Image: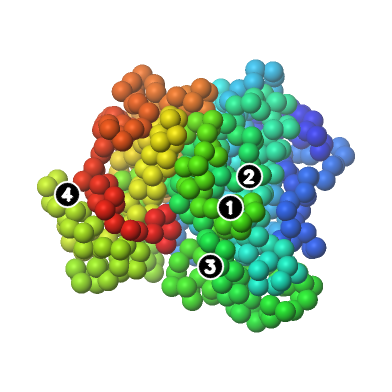
């Protein structure tokens, strides 16, 4: 055990496999009472030595009774461990010295409404040890406490912008800037990475004014810069939350501050159901902290100077279709009708996907087409658009596609959403459930090494090319070089290009449900 003195107080580590772990370090003051819906403040100093041997409570969120293939991963801490006092982070480091290692800061996913940085799936031991790097995972406010704009509907009585969760992430990055050198890290080499809503958070932070200068490289995984609510939509969601609570928009601020977090969670669930199951919680284009859709701001140059690696998995949407309540049974007519809600010319997209898949021998039934099209609309095409935007600025961006297939359910998931996480962290076999989802055995171990080496190389110098990926080049619209993380690992030009090209010809709502 070792002790590090942060700017707020002393913390004591535990040690595992040669790595120091500091769990549950407060990076901000508790956002409770009158601080609810306010920007985070610095952590309150403490005296003595804080033992950092267990994860802190997770942010308030719904309790997921059934998560399908990911039942092993989320809400592992149970309903009893939810708290508004949730702004804590975890640090794993190979050495408490002055070596100035690259720092990787993980932002968890969960639809901006669930998840935690404190779960065994995100344990940083393997990644820190393999790359002699410092790994940090963070909590942030979720749902109605972190991503609801109430300022508009309450006339400013509740000043929530809908970006309080992003401000929590910024506060964690400020903590890293101010303290990470004491943990053997380099505050001048910080990489942010995250998956799903975590990847979308990374994409938003690229364009988020308060985050400027706090990180130097970014890896949005299965999430990019196309996810944010416009102000009018965010205000409507805020009103829906109040309606579900039965609280008037004209009520005194004290009335909303007195609402229990459990009731706020329940109101968010009700508002989501009313919205047809859409992902109502997203960063908000509030006109001040976030002035436009992040992608447009990146196209304008706000992220110039930040190294980028971005990608998705080949079959993202199959994960969601495997979860209870998400199953679909479509025919061609209903497929076109469903896709018409988000795609201007669904027939053109359906035709392109059916043709390309038939040529490869892939399934072309309506359900299979739906999974493939939604995968690309929400995840892969936004990743490509971000790489194109960065390349258009004359900057280097590296694109990847995960193709490793999950063995779960006799292999019916293909390469689903979240399949990359276990290989990035080296936690694919931490439990029976994780091995069932991610896979195990020699090939899985080999892939873990290749993936971790690429992520660590990128965090070190901004270039993810390794001996296993020598042909991986920065993305451009001529070759569209893409690393393919499967077995075997490969580098290809414009994978699934016929499907990609279909999106160039249609108007579509990308990056969101």
User: Closer to the camera: disc 4 or disc 1?
Assistant: 1
- Label 3 vs label 1: CA separation? 15 Å
- Locate residue 468: give its quadrant: top left
The answer to which of marks 1 and 2 sits earlier in the sequence is 2
Q: Residues within 10 Å of mark 1 (few under 14, many from 20)?
A: some
Check disc 4 and report the residue beneath it.
356
Which is in the foreground here, disc 2 or disc 4?
A: 2
Q: What's the residue at 50%, 70% (across, down)?
A: 272
Residue 142 visible in rendering:
no
Could you say which is closer to the camera, residue 186 or residue 296?
296
- Label 4 packing within 10 angstroms: few (<14), some (14-19), many (20+): some
Would you say 56 lies left or right of 498 here? right
* Rendered view: 256 above or below 364: below
For marks 3 and 4, give the CA distance.
Answer: 36 Å
Pinpoint residue 385: horizontal percent, then vertical percent: 38, 44
Which of the two discs, 2 and 3, labels the residue nearer the N terminus?
2
Q: Where is residue 44 shown, x and y percent of the image?
A: 82, 46
The 10 Å Cα crowd at callout 2, few under 14, some 14 to 19, many 20 or more, is: some
Residue in front for this viewpoint, 343 or 194: 343
Q: Is residue 87 above or below residue 488?
A: below
- The residue indicated by pointer 1 is 291
Please report contact status of discs 4 and 1: CB closer than 8 Å, yes or no.
no
User: Mark 4 vs mark 1: which is more N-terminal?
Assistant: 1
Give me the disc on residue 209.
2
Q: Quadrant of the C terminus?
A: bottom left
Earlier sequence position, callout 2 versus callout 4: 2
In space, the residues marked 1 and 2 are separated at their CA atoms by 9 Å
Q: Crowding at label 3, few (<14), some or many (≥20) Cα neighbours within 10 Å?
A: some
């Amino acid at each position: 055990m070792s002790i590090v003195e942060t700017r707020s107080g002393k913390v004591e580590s535990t040690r595992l496999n040669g790595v120091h772990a500091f769990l549950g370090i407060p990076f901000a003051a508790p956002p409770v009472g009158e601080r609810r819906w306010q920007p985070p403040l610095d952590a309150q100093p403490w005296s003595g030595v804080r033992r950092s041997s267990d994860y802190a409570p997770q942010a308030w969120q719904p309790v997921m009774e059934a998560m399908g293939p990911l039942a092993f991963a989320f809400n592992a801490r149970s309903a009893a461990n939810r708290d508004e006092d949730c702004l804590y982070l975890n640090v794993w480091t190979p050495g408490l010295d002055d070596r100035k290692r690259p720092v990787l800061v993980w932002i968890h996913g969960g639809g901006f409404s669930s998840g935690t940085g404190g779960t065994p799936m995100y344990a940083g031991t393997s990644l820190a040890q393999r790359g002699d790097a410092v790994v940090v995972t963070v909590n942030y406010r979720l749902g109605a406490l972190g991503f609801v704009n109430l300022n508009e509907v309450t006339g400013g009585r509740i000043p929530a912008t809908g970006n309080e969760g992003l401000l929590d992430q910024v506060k964690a990055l400020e903590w890293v800037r101010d303290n990470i050198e004491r943990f053997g890290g380099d505050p001048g080499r910080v990489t942010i990475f995250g998956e799903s809503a975590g990847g979308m958070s990374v994409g938003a932070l690229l364009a988020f004014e308060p985050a400027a200068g706090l990180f130097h490289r970014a890896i949005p995984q299965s999430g990019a810069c196309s996810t944010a609510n416009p102000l009018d939509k965010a205000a409507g969601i805020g009103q829906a939350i109040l309606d579900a609570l039965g609280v008037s928009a004209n009520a005194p601020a004290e009335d909303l501050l007195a609402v229990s977090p459990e009731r706020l969670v329940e109101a968010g669930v009700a508002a989501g159901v009313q919205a047809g199951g859409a992902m109502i919680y997203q960063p908000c284009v509030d006109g001040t902290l976030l002035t436009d859709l992040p992608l447009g701001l990146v196209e304008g140059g706000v992220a110039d100077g930040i190294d980028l690696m971005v990608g998705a998995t080949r079959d993202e949407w199959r994960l969601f279709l495997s979860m209870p309540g998400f199953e679909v049974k479509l025919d061609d007519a209903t497929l076109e009708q469903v896709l018409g809600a988000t795609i201007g010319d669904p027939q053109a997209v359906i035709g392109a996907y059916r043709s390309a898949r038939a040529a490869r021998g892939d399934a072309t039934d309506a359900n299979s087409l739906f999974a493939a099209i939604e995968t690309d609309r929400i995840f892969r095409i936004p990743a490509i658009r971000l790489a194109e935007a960065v390349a258009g600025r004359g900057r280097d961006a590296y694109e990847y596609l995960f193709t490793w297939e999950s063995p779960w359910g006799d292999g019916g998931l293909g390469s689903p959403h979240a399949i990359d996480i276990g290989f990035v962290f080296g936690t694919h076999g931490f439990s029976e459930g994780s091995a069932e989802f991610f896979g195990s055995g020699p090939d899985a171990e080999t892939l873990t090494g290749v993936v971790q080496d690429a992520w660590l190389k990128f965090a070190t110098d901004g270039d993810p090319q390794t001996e296993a990926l020598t042909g991986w080049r920065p993305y451009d619209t001529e070759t569209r070089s893409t690393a393919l993380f499967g077995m075997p690992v490969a580098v290809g030009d414009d994978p699934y290009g016929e499907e990609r090209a279909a999106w160039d010809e249609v108007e579509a709502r990308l990056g969101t449900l």
